[in-house]
Image (tube, rainbow, N blue to C red):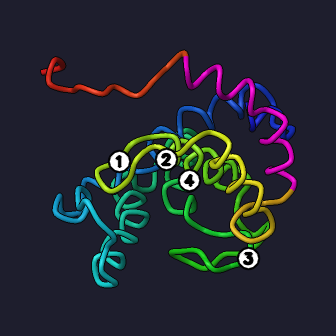
Amino acid sequence: MLARAAGLDETQAEKVLFATAMHDVGKIGIRDGILLKPGKLAPEEFEAMKAHTTIGADIIGDHPSELLTLARQIAIGHHERWDGSGYPNGEKGEDIPIESRIAAICDVFDALLSERPYKKAWPVDEAVDLIRESAGRHFDPRLVELFLELVPEILALHEQYPDEEDFADLG
């Protein structure tokens, strides 16, 4: 939805949808003790966690597929920040590909609304406020404006496809 609102055509928006699903593939290279830690990460643990972006890019590799090329770009760029304070490359503003900027907003919003081993799910209004307040620092301000207009539709989609709470029945 955000890709379409940002002006990407239907084909490119669909590629963003599928490529973004692979954005955290690099977390398979991070120790479970870090991934599942119930509290704040120590500085050295956070440094290890940051490597998931480059590990993911390495896993996806250089590939002739447009989808996998985009997935690699998003894997490596979804933690870059509009103000240049992100990682792994410290890219800034429009130097960050738009697909990575889109993925960053959507990833943070989804993470805020989701329960994790280290945090409870946030209330929607607080998550929306954080996205709004992060415009111009963490996120592309134009994309934040578009995202905020889409919040009702995004929440409807979030309700339609909730996170699985119990994975025991899957295997």
Which residue was labeled with disc 3?
A: 83
Distance in Å between CA atoms under marks 2 and 4: 16 Å
Residue 155 in the magenta stretch? The answer is yes
- Name the amino acid, label 3: Asp
Label 4 crowd (10 A; few <14 / some 14-19 / many >=20): many
Residue at (80, 68) in percent of width and height: 136
Q: Earlier in the sequence, mark 3 or mark 2?
A: 3
Magenta stretch, residue numbers: 142-159
Looking at the picture, tell me which residue is in the foreground, 11 or 43.
Answer: 43
Q: Residue 40: horizontal and vertical position, in percent?
A: 33, 70
Distance in Å between CA atoms under marks 3 and 1: 27 Å
Q: Residue 83: horizontal and vertical position, in percent?
A: 73, 76
Distance in Å between CA atoms under marks 1 and 2: 8 Å
Q: Is residue 143 left or right of residue 111?
A: right
Callout in the foreground (3, 1):
1
Which residue was labeled with disc 2?
A: 111
Q: Which label is found at residue 116?
A: 1
In which quadrant of the rendered view does residue 153 lie?
Answer: top right
Q: Earlier in the sequence, mark 3 or mark 1?
A: 3
Prevailing secondary structure class for the magenta stretch in the rendered image: helix
Residue at (35, 47) in percent of width and height: 116
Distance in Å between CA atoms under marks 3 and 2: 21 Å
Q: Residue 65: horizontal and vertical position, in percent?
A: 52, 40
